[in-house]
Image (spheres, rainbow, N blue to C red):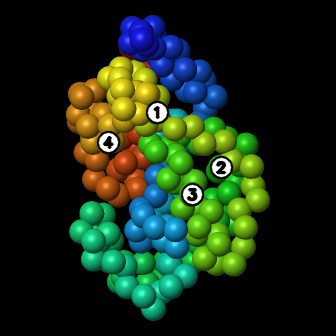
Amino acid sequence: MVNPTSSRIQAVQTARQVLQAKPVFLDTETTGLGNTDEIIEIAIVDVEMNILVDSFVKPSKANQPIPAASTAIHHITDDMVQSAPAWPILWSQIRTYLVGKVIVAYNSDFDMRLMRQSHTQHGFTLKDPLQPYDLMKLYAQFHGVWDSNRRSWKNFTLDEAGKTSGISLPNAHRSLADTLLARELLIFIANQ
């Protein structure tokens, strides 16, 4: 059996180490969850809460509408992304904020997959070495609810994590708001 107290202490120590690395925080909103979906909004914030990037992204399939189910979640419409920069243009601007940095994201596996897919949709490969750190997994360890079916800590949504931690920032399913919430959550864990 896993000891929730020692795991929580370890999570706090890890959060402190991640903060000492001066990470950047990242969140994306996408056209969907599938293997051909792509990023339509991205935000990057540094540990001091400076907004480095907060931008819509014009999808490669600009002639295909953003699915209504996705718009219902993040409220991003086709009109909002129409005049936004395409991913290759935006990537050339944002890669300097990411390469060589620890990148904290809530469910970083998803964000990194969508970055690779956005690259692919525009005909190029993500070759830059990125260092993602998954705050969702750290929070699961910190919160300490064991999922015996998965044999790991139970994952929670960013909204649940923020509310349980008493953080008043909303999980708005918009990149900047969610990036700021993730930043506050990591700081909350480190301060325990």
SS state under label 2:
helix
Comes first in the chain, label 1 or label 4: 1
Comes first in the chain, label 3 or label 1: 3
Query: Is 170 left or right of 124, judged from the image as shown?
Result: left
Query: Is 56 left or right of 114, judged from the image as shown?
Result: left
CA–CA distance in space, label 2 to label 4: 24 Å
Comes first in the chain, label 1 or label 2: 2
Q: Residue 185: horizontal and vertical position, in percent?
A: 38, 31
SS state under label 4:
loop
Amino acid type at mark 2: Leu
Amino acid type at mark 1: Lys
Comes first in the chain, label 2 or label 4: 2
CA–CA distance in space, label 1 to label 2: 20 Å
Q: Residue 40: horizontal and vertical position, in percent?
A: 46, 70
SS state under label 3:
helix
Label 2: which residue? 98
Residue 137's disc is 1
Label 4: which residue? 157
Residue 113's disc is 3
Q: How many marks?
A: 4
Q: Quadrant of residue 4?
A: top left
CA–CA distance in space, label 1 to label 4: 11 Å
CA–CA distance in space, label 3 to label 4: 18 Å
